[in-house]
Image (cartoon, rainbow, N blue to C red):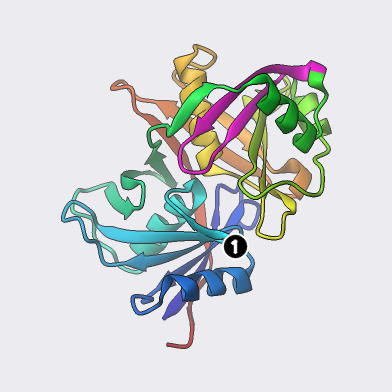
Amino acid sequence: MRLDLVDVFGAQPMRGNPLAVVHGGEGLSADQMLRLTQWLGFSETTFLLPPTDPAADYRVRIFYPAGELPFAGHPTLGSAFAWLASGGQSRRAGVVVQECMAGLIEVRQIGELLSFAAPAFTRYEPMTAAETTAAVRFAGVDPGSVVEAVHVANGPNWQLLRLNSANDVLAARPVQHAPLGTDIGLAAPAEPESSVDWELRAFFANQHGSLVEDPVTGSFNAGLAMHLFASGLAHGSYRAGQGQVTGADGRVHCELSADGQVWIGGRCDMIAKGAALPG
């Protein structure tokens, strides 16, 4: 087996979200994949495998330290990048088709950016008052700053808290512990002088019950973008920033194409390539 370390969504190398990509792990069981993911310690590790769907260029299994995910954003871009870097040739020029538990996901390449087609919602509806109260408490935000609370699940069960201002987003002080399955994202329009249009933060509970802040989150950006475009809060395209509080400097490019598809893009950088792992 071989291991690549890829940085995804960074404004520059090593300022985005790290991803471990394993090649040649066909013989691993799900338990072995999970144990390697836990040992590496990144938010996700992916395993590139031969496709089972003839329309796909490759198949990927996506693990986080508490289990397997049907879809995740930065692992999708990072996996496509590593697959191409290892010599992968897609069936269609400029488009890679990824097979994962959520189905077939298209990844397109334009210049230095890779973009994935945002998958359909698995849950999209307003949060209840009780759900909102719990999310506000876990995220540590001022209840008075919440403009709306919406389920924007697309694999991870993201709960969106849209806040009044970017300052409200950056001022959030999440609790240390939350139930497994807690996925909360914060978003607000960026300040006028900012180089981005929206400011984001995202938190998830790990297998130990700790609430962890994710540096840059493709799946939450996808759910947010679909909601913003659908509700008329964004038009055409915009750029989101994420990761300030974690020391990252994430840049996520969100675009609504003419056919109604939402695309989530960013740069990928190879930090280390082809480290050998025991077979």
- Residue 17's place in the image compared with 199, above or below, is below
Question: Is residue 272 in sight in this rendering?
Answer: yes
Residue 182 appears at what percent x and percent y? 64, 43
Residue 274 appears at what percent x and percent y? 46, 77
Residue 96 appears at what percent x and percent y? 29, 50
SS at circle 1? loop
Q: Quadrant of residue 256?
A: top left
**Mark 1 closeness class: few <14, some 14–19, many ≥20 residues within 10 Å:** many
The one of 102 and 56 positioned closer to us in this rendering: 102
Name of the residue lying farthest toward the front: 130
Quadrant of the drawing holding the C terminus: bottom left
Quick check: is 159 in the magenta stretch?
yes
Q: Quadrant of residue 191?
A: top right
| Circle count | 1
Q: Residue at x 65, y 59 (%)?
A: 207
Looking at the rendering, the stretch of residues picked out in magenta corresponds to 144-163
Name of the residue lying farthest toward the bottom: 278
Q: Going by the image, does 7 lie left or right of 246?
A: left
Quick check: is 50 in the magenta stretch?
no
Residue carrying label 1: 65
Task: Residue type at mark 1: give it.
Answer: Pro
Quadrant of the drawing holding the N terminus: bottom left
Q: Going by the image, does 208 lie left or right of 225?
A: right
Q: Residue at x 31, y 52 (%)?
A: 98
Residue 18 appears at what percent x and percent y? 59, 59
Q: Residue at x 24, y 57 (%)?
A: 57
- Residue 231's place in the image compared with 222, above or below, is above
